[in-house]
Image (spheres, rainbow, N blue to C red):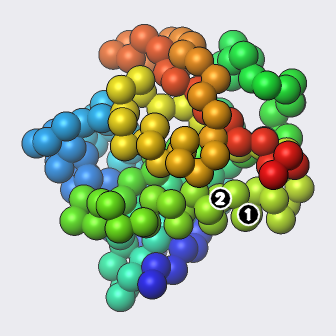
Amino acid sequence: MMHIRRCKTEDITAAGEFYDRVVEYLDSHINYPKWTYKEYPSEGYARAMTAEGYQYIGEKDGKIIAAFVFNQDPEGDYHKGRWSRQLQEGEFMVVHALAVDPELHGTGIGKEIVRFCIDTAKKNGFKAIRLDIVPGNVPAKHLYEGLGFAYIGDEDVRPEVKHISEFSLYELNLDEK
C-alpha cells in the first residue's frame, strides 16, 4: 500500500531523482506530457514546491513510487478556459506534475493519487479541481476522465511554454458530486 505525504526538505534530492527517472523513461518510450529532463519536472521544481508545501510524494517500502504537486496555483492563464462555472483562484485546487514509477503503470497508483486530491480538496472546502494536460496525453486523459473530470477544451494557457501551443483543460466540480 502506498503512503502519500508532503515532501520534506530531506526528500527533495530523492524526489528530483525520481522525476529524472520518469522523464528518462518517457524519453525512451512515448513522452506523452512532453516533460523535459532536468527542467520540468525536476529537483528544482520539487525544491520550490516543497518550500511552499505543495510537493507530495507517494512511498512504498521507503521508496518514492509517485510524486505530484497539489495547490491553488494554475501556473497559467486559466481565465481563458470555458469552465462550466466561474470560480476565482482560491476556490479550486490544481494538480501538477503527477508522475508514477514506470514499473508500476497500470496498477492504480494514479487513481489513488487523484482520489487523494479529491478527498483533500473536499475536506478543505474547495469547489473544484482543475488541471491541464498536453493534448495527446492519452494516459492522463483516461485517468482523469475515468474519475469523472470533464474535458473543457484546449487553450494556450501557458504562452511561455514554447514547445506546447495549447493545453487540454479538465475540471471536476466537487460540490456537485
Judge the density around disc 2: few (<14), some (14-19), many (≥20) Cα neighbours within 10 Å: some
Q: What residue is at 38 percent from the left and 17 percent from the top?
A: 164
Give x and y (percent) for residue 27.
16, 39
126 or 142: nearer the viewer: 142
Residue 88 visible in the picture: yes
176 or 103: nearer the viewer: 176
How far apart are the alpha carbons under marks 2 and 1?
A: 5 Å
Considering every residue shown, the one lying at the far bottom of the view is: 61
Q: What residue is at 22 percent from the left and 65 percent from the top?
A: 103
Q: Residue 117, which numbered label?
A: 2
Q: Residue 11, which numbered label?
A: none
Q: Residue 120, which numbered label?
A: 1
Asked where in the image residue 5 lies, by quadrant, the reply is bottom right
161 is higher (above) or lower (below) than 42: above
Q: Cβ–Cβ below 8 Å for labels 2 and 1?
A: yes
- In the drawing, does residue 171 fall left or right of residue 168? right
What quarter of the picture does the N terminus occupy?
A: bottom left
Q: What residue is at 46 percent from the left and 37 percent from the top?
A: 141
> What amino acid type should be assigned to the residue bearing mark 1?
Thr
Asked where in the image residue 88 lies, by quadrant, the reply is top right
> What amino acid type should be assigned to the residue bearing mark 2?
Cys
